[in-house]
């Protein structure tokens, strides 16, 4: 055996030993956490993580939680939130660090948002790293179509394929087709379907400081019940839950006598979810009768989503808007695609400063209106939310869950 080959073999042996040791460490940290819960789905994952963590904490379980959506953070058992600072591209390997943190903090439960989009990463995250006792599925909607397929049916198959055997799956009624549910049960998955009338008393009696969705609350209550926390106790904890950065929220902006309401629906992302947010906004008493000006934020790295939105806006299946302002990356592409429908009511804004974008939107209707932010929260969307939060006063969109 030559010296070069010997060095190469030694290097390979060292790598295999390292990976074996790391795998053992992950398994040890995982076993040290008595209850592991993952939340997956298209929309609402961060909110459901927060609701579950609040409910478990109210039941006396020392809980660590992690969200990875609009603004990644770790929620400590004390309730303190720490932003998750990443040095590079987000990776499912950071779930290993969260397991380690949960062990060090002697957490009785860990609640984490599933990070993966690609099916192979999704299966590895659930089946090899976290191995949840309970997996909550919020909903299945067409988004990330390059990885999950063009239809909700394609996405449903992708979500179902990565569910680990022998875990508990909690999901809303209708989230997965019945044949997929039956297939999961044959693999040893215990499926709990949460009906639209489940926990009606707790849902009706619960109010939070932002526009939460009843389906999210029902799902979180069902997960807490699976963990042994009664719905009435869990609901008490959920009342004080803090809104995720991407949650549907609104602020009143006053400038020179004209009153505007700015709405953060950026994180809804896909047209189906955004339309749910839109209907809630137009039905809100604070927004009734006011003209709606859409602020659509485009991201160059979400081409599939941009194509979805162009089709929805051009066909009239998107929000009904008095005016459409397109901002972000290459806004002219979207404006050209929807020009036939919106004519001179669509314009692009080259500004990247949130104050400037807000002023331009306000000029469209000098007497005031509703600034409806949608499309993508990344980049300029997040900057606009931060600006509105800083200069505006919170507005309640609804006094009840819907």
Image: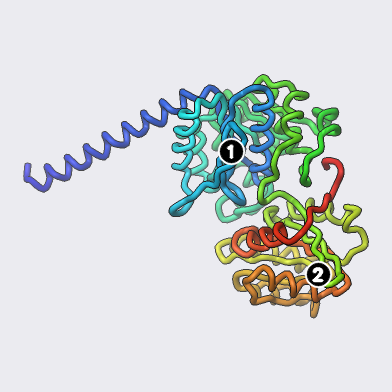
Residue 207, position as x, y percentages in the image? 81, 38
Q: Residue at x 89, y 64 (%)?
A: 290
Query: In this view, which residue lies farthest toward the top?
Result: 228
> Quick check: can you spot residue 186?
no
Residue at the image point whose x is 77% and y is 76% from the top: 340
Way the structure is coloured: rainbow
Query: Residue 192: in sight, yes or no?
Result: yes
Image coordinates for residue 222, horizontal then vertical, percent? 71, 27
Q: Which mark is residue 75?
A: 1
| Mark 2: few/some/many CA within 10 Å (<14, 14-19, 20+) | few
Q: Secondary structure at mark 1?
A: strand
Residue placed under numbered mark 2 in the picture: 255
Viewer-side residue, 149 vs 280: 280
In the image, 1 versus 94, the foreground residue is 94
Q: Position of residue 23 (x, y in %)?
A: 37, 32
Say if mark 2 contacts mark 1, CB within 8 Å: no
Quarter of the image that includes the C terminus: top right
Relative horizontal placement of residue 330, taking residue 207 as reference (left or right): left
Residue 275 lies left or right of residue 181; in this view the side is: right
Q: Where is residue 164 shown, x and y percent of the image?
A: 53, 30
Labels in figure, total: 2
Residue sitting at the far left: 2
Q: In the figure, 245 relative to 34: above or below? A: below
Q: Residues within 10 Å of mark 1 (few under 14, many from 20)?
A: many
Instruction: Label 2: state its secondary structure.
Output: strand
Is 171 above or below relative to 70? above
Q: Is residue 28 left or right of residue 76?
A: left
Q: Which mark is residue 161?
A: none
Q: Nearer the viewer, residue 141 or 243?
A: 243
Mark nearer the N terminus (2 vs 1): 1
Quarter of image, res 97:
top left
């Amino acid at each position: 055996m030559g010296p070069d080959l010997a060095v190469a073999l030694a290097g390979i042996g060292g790598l295999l030993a390292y990976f074996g040791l790391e795998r053992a460490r992950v398994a040890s940290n995982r076993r040290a956490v008595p209850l592991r819960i993952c939340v997956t789905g298209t929309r609402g994952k961060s909110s459901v993580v927060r609701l579950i963590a609040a409910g478990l904490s109210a039941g006396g379980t020392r809980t660590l939680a992690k969200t990875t959506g609009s603004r990644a953070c770790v929620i400590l058992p004390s309730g303190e939130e720490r932003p998750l600072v990443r040095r590079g591209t987000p990776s499912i390997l950071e779930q290993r660090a969260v397991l380690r943190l949960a062990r060090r903090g002697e957490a009785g439960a860990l609640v984490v948002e599933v990070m993966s989009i690609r099916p192979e990463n999704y299966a590895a995250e659930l089946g090899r790293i976290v191995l949840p006792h309970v997996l909550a599925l919020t909903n299945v909607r067409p988004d990330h179509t390059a990885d999950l397929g063009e239809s909700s049916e394609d996405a449903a198959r992708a979500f179902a394929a990565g569910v680990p055997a022998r875990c508990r799956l909690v999901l809303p009624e209708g989230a997965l087709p019945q044949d997929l549910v039956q297939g999961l049960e044959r693999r040893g998955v215990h499926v709990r379907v949460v009906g639209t009338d489940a926990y009606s008393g707790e849902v009706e009696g619960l109010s939070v400081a932002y526009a939460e969705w009843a389906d999210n609350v029902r799902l979180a209550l069902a997960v807490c019940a699976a963990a042994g926390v009664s719905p009435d106790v869990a609901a008490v904890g959920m009342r004080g839950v803090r809104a995720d950065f991407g949650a549907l929220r609104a602020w009143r902006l006053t400038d020179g006598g004209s009153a505007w309401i700015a709405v953060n629906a950026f994180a809804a992302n896909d047209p189906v979810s955004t339309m749910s947010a839109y209907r809630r906004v137009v039905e809100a008493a604070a927004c009734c009768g006011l003209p709606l000006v859409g602020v659509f934020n485009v991201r160059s790295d979400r081409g599939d989503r941009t194509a979805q939105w162009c089709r929805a806006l051009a066909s009239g299946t998107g929000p009904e808007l008095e005016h459409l302002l397109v901002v972000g990356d290459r806004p002219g592409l979207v404006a050209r695609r929807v020009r036939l429908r919106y004519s001179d009511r669509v314009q692009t804004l080259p500004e990247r400063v949130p104050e400037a974008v807000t002023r331009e939107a306000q000029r469209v209707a000098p007497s005031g209106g509703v600034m409806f932010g949608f499309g993508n929260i990344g980049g300029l969307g997040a900057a606009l939310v931060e600006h509105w939060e800083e200069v505006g006063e919170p507005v309640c969109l609804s006094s009840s869950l819907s």
